[in-house]
Amino acid sequence: MKKETLYLDTSVASAYYDERAKERMEVTIKFWKEILPHYKTYVSEVTVNELEDTKDENLRRRFRKLIKGFKVLKIKKTIRDLARAYIEKEIFPEKYIDDALHVAMASYYEVSYLVSWNYEHLVKVKTRRLVNSVNILEGFKDIEIVSPLEL
């Protein structure tokens, strides 16, 4: 049987080492060890670039090691266009283009689940409904946007 797929946005990888939110960090570490092995896991150029923006060189190295085994999905014009459609439909504000790109990446590559700790812009019913209505109009499949707790 083919493994389902996961797309991890930046919030999941960054939570792995975020000692400011101990409970979320512990859940993320457990998710990494117990859940991820059951899925084929992806990140994207967006995720990699955001992690590379980390000022702490030691932490950047840890992030690189953490995501090393995951396939990195490439940005394409169609993905940028889909992200732009989300912004035009006011699902995401212009300043959160990276959130729109994360969703567009997962939608374009037909990933089973986009996993995020971003409850403000991504992991909420309204966002899922609006994103999926745009996806249908644009010829893409539905995407499930979930937190690590939901898998």
Image (tube, rainbow, N blue to C red):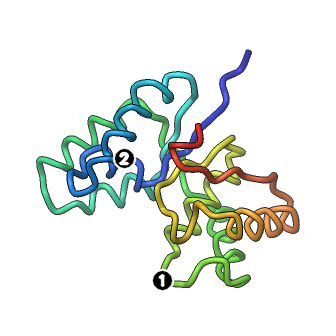
Quarter of the view holding residue 33: top left
Farthest-out residue, front: 23
What residue is disc 2 on? 13
Q: In the figure, 82 relative to 43: above or below?
A: below
Foreground disc of the pair 2, 1: 2
Q: Quadrant of the C terminus?
A: top right
- The amino acid marked with disc number 1 is Lys
Pick whichever, 65 or 124, lies toward us. Answer: 124
- The amino acid marked with disc number 2 is Ala
What residue is disc 1 on? 95
Pick whichever, 145 or 26, lies toward us. Answer: 26
Spatial CA distance of label 2 from label 1 is 21 Å
Spot occupied by residue 131 in the image (x, y as percentages of width and height): 73, 66
Q: Are marks 2 and 1 in contact (CB under 8 Å)?
A: no
Q: In the figure, 37 relative to 43: above or below?
A: above
Pick whichever, 30 or 70, lies toward us. Answer: 30
Pick whichever, 25 or 82, lies toward us. Answer: 25
Residue positioned 67% across, 84% down in the render? 90
Spot occupied by residue 108 in the image (x, y as percentages of width and height): 70, 53
Q: Quadrant of the N terminus?
A: top right
Packing grade of label 2 (10 A; few <14, some 14-19, many >=20) is many
Spot occupied by residue 52 in the image (x, y as percentages of width and height): 28, 56
Asked if residue 143 lies left or right of residue 72, the reply is: right
In primary-sequence order, the first of circles 2 and 1 is 2
